[in-house]
Image (cartoon, rainbow, N blue to C red):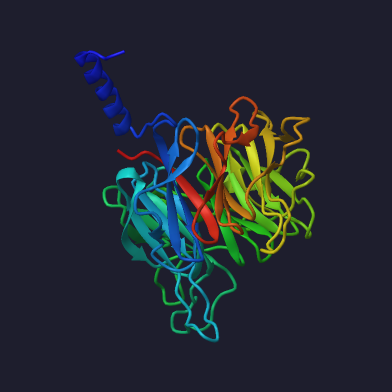
Amino acid sequence: MKLSRIGRVSMAFVVSVAMGLGMTACGGGTIGYLWVMGTQYNQIAGFKIDDFTGNLTAIPTSPFSSGGTNPVSIVVKPGGRYVYVINKGTPATSTTPATAGQIAAFSVGNEGVLTFQLSYTSQGTTPVWASVDSTGSFLYVLDQQAPPVDPTQPTILPPYGSITVFAIDPNTGRLQLVPNQQVKNSQGTQLTYFPVGSQPTMMKVAANNCLYTLNSGDNTIFPYSIGTGGQLTLTTNSTITTGATRLTSVNANGSYVYLTDAGAANTPGQILPYTTGTGCALNTLTGGPVPNLTGASNPVNTMVDSKGRYLYVVNNSTTNSQATATSNVSAFAIDSTSGKLQPLPIGDTNNPYPVGAGPLCMVQDPTNQYVYTSNNIDGTVTGKIINQNTGQLSDLQRGSKFPATGQATCLAVSGVVN
């Protein structure tokens, strides 16, 4: 059958629109961008997320340089126009000098392309994590080692870490240091950082303007209250003892805070649920610790879905790159009134859900259809469909594993930037 001239023009118009929207007969439009870091080559792999399938396709010119050495944490400014990468740096060896840690700032362009802007230095050393406040006005950078208390004795370091606060310019994404207005050093000048606990590894900004830092040195949580101008204020309970054997992550959902305790080697570990109280204190949730699921081990991170209904525990299983243990994600339902956790759904033999080897981080796409894990050992990203009614995870329809770059660490997502 021959098409009329009008029919041919109409079809050409439809095809043109579809191409303009990034649509094909095999997929939908791009609903967001995903960036995953890799330490082997100090690169960031960028992907476009397909609406219909959840499949990942490479962003043009990907991978991108991380702007430093050993990228470990990545955060997106709300609005999606700027991305900040924490490069941890590396210690000196017998053959190579040390490389300093720093923060690399990127702008997000057409199709999710990252363009390096500037590098910044935090006040301490060995930066390991970053968070942005809910307004996107301030960037908090966590250092494992705080700077010297007495600047005249630079070799004497305190036994704790620190947070450096930066104000984010809303128009350029550039960073400006925010000094500590509450504490002065021995010289009588304001500190340029905020002290935390021993060997911090992660932090989380909660909805109630509380910031919680996980201290791996003594398995404690150090809370701050976020005040005007990005200032961090010490609470009445400066250090919170958890009783954990091996604290590995901290997350928040409304007035609830969830910690993971990896416990002894080759054990499932447990989740420690709390409610937030006055002064950012943590109160143990009724019922106490929740055991991780059978078949899971070495929990290293968690993700709460965008609606606050489900908690997903990322189980690394092993830190041995030669091991064949199955890595997976444990899924729990969150009671909306009590915050209690319940494995979901009862009878689902696929929970915990298998992912790539050595997962470290997990994110949800901007439209809440898909979740992704970054897998360190096999250098991949695993994608899953999330059932909005039950929280169950299932494989993407056209393959769920995508190659990243080198040894993948953490990842971040953003909606499409116009």
Q: Nearer the viewer, residue 50 or 246?
A: 50
The quarter of the picture where residue 244 lies is bottom right
Q: Is residue 414 left or right of residue 382?
A: left
Instruction: Tell me where residue 369 appears, x and y as whole percent.
Output: 52, 32
Instruction: Tell me where residue 396 appears, x and y as whole percent.
Output: 57, 36
Instruction: Tell me where residue 79 appears, x and y as whole percent.
Output: 36, 41
Extreme residue in the left direction: 5
The reply to whether residue 211 is visible in this rendering is no
For the C terminus, the quadrant is top left
For the N terminus, the quadrant is top left
Q: Which residue lies at the image location 68% right of the left edge and 38% below the top edge?
A: 331
The reply to whether residue 376 is visible in this rendering is yes
Extreme residue in the bottom direction: 94
In the displayed structure, 395 sits above or below 390; it is below
Instruction: Tell me where residue 230 appears, x and y as whole percent.
Output: 41, 52
Q: Which residue lies at the image location 32% right of the left edge and 28% below the top edge?
A: 18
Q: Is residue 195 left or right of residue 277?
A: left
Q: Which residue lies at the image location 78% right of the left edge and 39% below the top edge?
A: 287
Q: Is residue 154 left or right of residue 371?
A: left
Q: Which residue lies at the image location 26% right of the left edge and 48% below the top edge?
A: 171
Picture mark count: 0
Q: Nearer the viewer, residue 320 or 117?
A: 320
The quarter of the picture where residue 415 lies is top left
Q: Nearer the viewer, residue 21 or 212?
A: 21
